[in-house]
Amino acid sequence: MTEKERGAQMYHDIDYGLGRERAAQMRKEVEHNRLEARLARAARSDEGNVARRGRVARGAALVTALFR
């Protein structure tokens, strides 16, 4: 193998390694973004449930007050 071929192989190995690292980093970022979205969606649904429970409680209090 000539010096030029060894240099080309070295750069190929470096590029390949950097590409693998970047792909792994991108997968990690995507998973993180999915987790954040899932948590945000859960928080919004919890807020909606709290609001519904509040309306039900107010309605029950109103009905109870009407029958006293």
Image (cartoon, grey):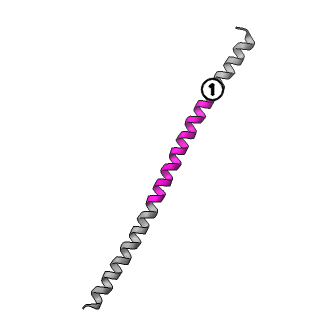
Which SS type dominates the magenta stretch?
helix
What residue is at 69 percent from the left and 22 percent from the top? 11
User: What is the quadrant of residue 4 in the picture?
Assistant: top right
Local crowd size for mark 1, using a 10 Å CA cut-off: few (<14), some (14–19), many (≥20): few
Q: Which residues are magenta?
A: 16-42
Quarter of the image for the N terminus: give it.
Answer: top right
- The residue at which mark 1 appears reads as 16
Using residue 61 as the reference point, say whether residue 3 is left or right of it.
right
Q: Is residue 37 magenta?
A: yes
What residue is at 66 percent from the left and 27 percent from the top? 15
- Residue lying furthest top in this view? 1
Quarter of the image for the C terminus: give it.
Answer: bottom left
Using residue 51 as the reference point, say whether residue 23 is left or right of it.
right
Give the vertical position of 63 relative to 41 (above or below). below
What residue is at 50 percent from the left and 49 percent from the top? 34
- Residue lying furthest left in this view? 68
The x and y percentages for residue 51 are 41, 72
The x and y percentages for residue 28 are 53, 41
Query: For the residue labelled by badge 1, is the local secondary structure a helix, a strand or a loop?
Result: helix
User: What is the quadrant of residue 24 in the picture?
Assistant: top right
The x and y percentages for residue 14 are 65, 24
Using residue 30 as the reference point, say whether residue 54 is left or right of it.
left
Check disc 1 and give the amino acid type: Tyr
Give the vertical position of 39 relative to 68 (above or below). above
Give the vertical position of 34 relative to 7 (above or below). below
The x and y percentages for residue 57 are 33, 78
What residue is at 25 percent from the left and 90 percent from the top? 67
Using residue 53 as the reference point, say whether residue 4 is left or right of it.
right
